[in-house]
Amino acid sequence: MEFTLEEGRNLSADCSALLLPGLSIGNVGQLAVDLLISSTGAKRVGFLDDPSLLPCVGNDAYGPEPEGVLALPLEAYESPPHALTLMQQRSPVIKGMMVQFAKNLADFVSSIGKKHVIILSSLDSGRMKKIVASSDMQVYYVSSTNNDGNDSDCERLGFKRLEEYDPTQRRWKYLNELAEGKPDQEDELSFEDELVHDDYYPGLPFAALFSCCKAKGLKVTCLLCYCSEGDNIADSFQLADAGCKLLRLTPDKFSGHVEGGWNTPLSWQSVYGPPPDVSLF
């Protein structure tokens, strides 16, 4: 993985925490990172290139006015006042390359001295074992603090440990061995093996990122929510807020003009297309 600094920019040693998305259903993690970049006033400090990422390019995502600044597949932003580095991933990883991509990213994160990695991602609501009747989205987590994924800080904030995280389960165990670079050939799993319900979770991008960062000795926390495909902007606000709580940031002190201090990105004006033509009704 190659990192290229923006002209006149440098990585700040004061930004000890790194927040990034794990691509998944509904793009909630990406939307939440967009919201945080826009609201904290973070500036792009560079971009990363990895052969595992599909290429993409777009116009300026944050504005306030489009200036023709190209948005690339994997970018790094920093907000020194909030001691925060953010990475935005705009394109998916090539099929079969997720673990290698996660290893490359973990190597880079370790090399720049980050102390805490927070991964924001989403889960398919059709996989929920229990449906909670509440207007507030329940945030789930997995942490490297303890072997079972438990973390007292996350519990104190009202987050629930993802029950499906079990490091002794065959696919979680195999993923951890891949991340550490020492899979036992006798235990190697075949894609033709019968999948069970709990195999869904270790097959997601957040799981590879979590395992590879953990294998590098980094403190890593995944914040997760269940959702469906569709307009998930409301979910992204809540997931971004959960990230702020974990980092002890106060959105009310952000410079945004939306209630709560948030500032929605320019790119959101067209994220779901124009409104329906009311003359049709």
Image (cartoon, helix red, strand yellow):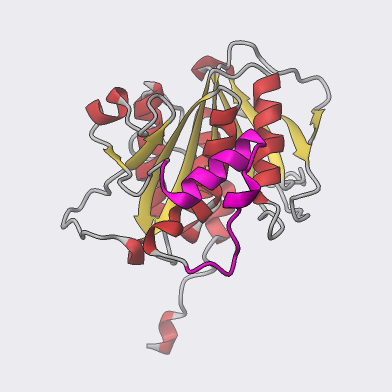
Q: Quadrant of residue 4?
A: top right
Q: Residue furthest bottom?
A: 280
Pick whichever, 88 or 105, lies toward us.
Answer: 105
Is 110 situated above or below 23?
A: above
Q: Quadrant of residue 127?
A: bottom left
Is 120 situated above or below 6?
A: below
Pick whichever, 258 or 120, lies toward us.
Answer: 120
Q: Residue at x 25, y 30 (%)?
A: 155
Is 57 situated above or below 252?
A: below
Q: Residue furthest left?
A: 133
| Whole-percent x, y for residue 54 in the image | 75, 56
| Whole-percent x, y for residue 177 in the image | 58, 39
Please state, as top left, top right, bottom left or bottom right, where the N terminus lies in the image: top right
In this rendering, position of residue 80 left or right of residue 56: left
In this rendering, position of residue 158 left or right of residue 248: left
| Whole-percent x, y for residue 188 in the image | 61, 53
Q: Residue at x 53, y 15 (%)?
A: 81
Q: Residue at x 34, y 67 (%)?
A: 126
Residue 184 visible (yes or no): yes
Q: Residue at x 42, y 63 (%)?
A: 231
Pick whichever, 67 or 55, lies toward us.
Answer: 55
In this rendering, position of residue 244 left or right of residue 139: right
In this rendering, position of residue 248 left or right of residue 81: left
| Image: magenta residue range | 168-194
Is 241 situated above or below 277?
A: above
| Whole-percent x, y for residue 122 in the image | 43, 52
Residue 61 visible (yes or no): no
Q: Residue furthest top?
A: 14
